[in-house]
Image (cartoon, helix red, strand yellow):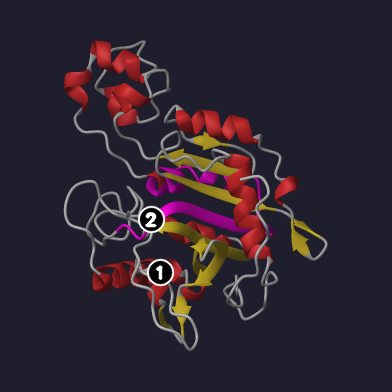
Amino acid sequence: MAGLRWMAVTLAVFLSTGNSLAVGQNQLLTIVQQVRRKYTNPNDDQSKLPMFSLAVSIPKSGESYDVGAVPDNGEDVKNAMLKCEVFTGTKVVGATLLSDVFNRCKDGRVQRQDVLAQCPPGVVTWLDVEEKCKDKVGNIDDHAEYRTLQALSAIQNNNNFKDLMLFYVYAAPCDQKCTSEKSDWSILNTIQQITKWGNYAVVFKKLFIPKVGEKPTKPVREQSLRNLASSGKIGLQNIFRCDNIEGQMQCLSCSTDGLVTHYCVSDKKPKQKGGEEDEDGWIAARGKKG
């Protein structure tokens, strides 16, 4: 990701529950790119880092927010996530999708107490589970944002609420679990925690496509984002999609005149002013077209 240019954010960015402009139009994009560079694979290689989520409490320095002032070591965060562990630091919580653990995460610590409760004493890693109690633990499939929010108290205990809270998830919205009002893995209640910060933003890059089942329709994705926005009064104006548009990284607000922005729920490129919408497919969470 070296050499990326800091491109202008297309829409004005409002990151608070009030009406004040928390950061400049360029700064959210800069923050997102710096966080990605610091805490994930520098080559943006999703084969090495599965679906992931990060909650980063970013201190203010003068009139801007400074990712460099976040003390948690980027390699420590990355290595913990690659082992399927939830990283909990002073200002960072991060996790990947917890699945395929017996192939991906043999050396990773088991942090699910319900799994450990089904296993004999001395079980620490997923390799231990595989060897001693695999038949008792059932299906392991926890989404990254769910795991991150379950551990967010680690940051809250450090009284960081004057910072900017960036809640980042690689692909969204997830209608089947995370933003479902009926799912046991819903984040609609736990996402409310981020509103304790004076300024916050929920950011995603790609559109979520489940491994099993049909691709969500546009109306389903719209409802999913509305569920997320209304839960705990997150606000649609505080949700953004930051991805490459015509070769340039840009961030777009998911709120357009109070409605869900088309780009936040569609694989198609955003409509340009005075032009026609491009019909080419965008890279989705689990692959790319062409």
Please name the residue that numbered disc 2 is placed on: 283
SS for callout 1: helix
Of the two numbered discs 2 and 1 on the same chain, state the one appearing first in sequence.
Answer: 1
Residue extent of the magenta highlight: 145-174
Q: Nearer the viewer, residue 163 or 279?
A: 279
Magenta span contains residue 1 = no
Q: Residue at x 46, y 30 (%)?
A: 82
227 to the left or right of 205: left
Q: Position of residue 77 (x, y in %)?
A: 57, 34
Q: Please tell me whether residue 171 belongs to the stretch shown in magenta.
A: yes
- Residue at 65% across / 53% down in the picture? 4
Considering every residue shown, the one lying at the far right of the view is 62
Q: Amino acid at mark 1?
A: Cys
Residue reaching furthest front? 290
Q: Is residue 21 visible?
A: yes
Image position of 70 with respect to 242: above or below: above
Instruction: Give residue 87's position: percent from left, percent from top.
Output: 52, 35
Mark 2 or 1, closer to the camera: 2
Viewer-closest of 36 and 190: 36
For the point 33% across and 11% down, which residue is it? 121
Distance from disc 2 to disc 1, alpha carbons, whole Å, reads 13 Å
Q: Is residue 196 above or below residue 89?
A: below
Q: Quadrant of the C terminus?
A: bottom left
- Tell me the number on the disc at residue 167: none
Q: Nearer the viewer, residue 199 or 83?
A: 83
* Crowd tier of the residue under label 2, counting other residues whose Cα lies within 10 Å: few below 14, some 14–19, many 20 or above: some
User: What residue is shown with label 1?
Assistant: 264
Relative placement, left or right, of 96 versus 287 is right
The residue positioned 50% from the left and 53% from the top of the image is 168
From the viewer's perspective, is residue 10 above or below residue 206? below
At label 2, the amino acid type is Ile
